[in-house]
Image (cartoon, rainbow, N blue to C red):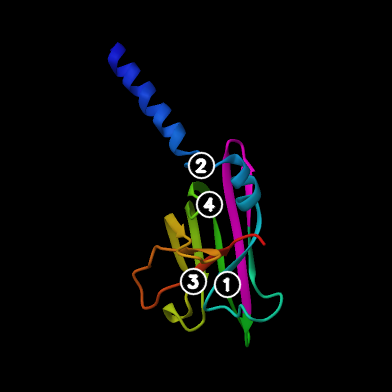
Amino acid sequence: MKHVINGLGIVLLLLSFSLKAGNVSEHFVNKAIIGTHDFTLQWLDNSRVGNRGKIEFSRLGDGIVAKGYQEERVDNELNFMKFSGNVVVISQRELRITGDLVTRIHHINGGEVLYRTGTFVFKAHGKRQYWRLQNHRKHEVIDYVDIHFIK
């Protein structure tokens, strides 16, 4: 019984580490993650001034949470992207966010809202100044969801 309790303690300890930021400094997290970032989906008009979405990263207890939104009107229809979840900073170039991503684009998926839940991996490859969603949905198209670095 003692070994079971000790084993459980080790598992809980390992789980607590996995919820914290990876091999990155608190300085980096505070400077580069916490705050408001531009948040874009290529199907929405990102070139018009003021139309980029925003995603807010904030602390909640010992963790980090994200909540973002972008929209555009096309004729009388509303296209949008909504995202929220719990964040793990794996490295300066990789984020993992477990939560919900909801999109609605009038010419994709028959114009129906698409709900996705799970762990979403965002990576900044090469010299890119944004983290791009790596999870490709099993659907007719690929969404380029980008979280832009704070400038």
Identify the disc placed on residue 21: 2
Q: Mark 3 highlights which residue?
A: 113
Q: CA distance from mark 1 to mark 4?
A: 17 Å
Rendering coords of residue 25 (x, y %): 56, 41
Q: Which of pointers 1 and 4 lies earlier in the amino acid sequence?
A: 1
Q: Nearer the viewer, mark 3 or mark 4?
A: 4
Q: Mark 1 highlights which residue?
A: 80
Task: Kindly report the secondary structure that dominates the magenta region of the rendered protein.
Answer: strand
Q: Residues within 10 Å of mark 1 (few under 14, many from 20)?
A: many
Q: Nearer the viewer, mark 1 or mark 3?
A: 1
Q: Which of pointers 1 and 2 lies earlier in the amino acid sequence?
A: 2
| Three-letter code for the amino acid on which mark 4 is drawn | Gly
The residue tagged with tag 1: helix, strand or loop? strand
| Three-letter code for the amino acid on which mark 1 is drawn | Phe
Magenta stretch, residue numbers: 56-72
Q: Mark 4 highlights which residue?
A: 85
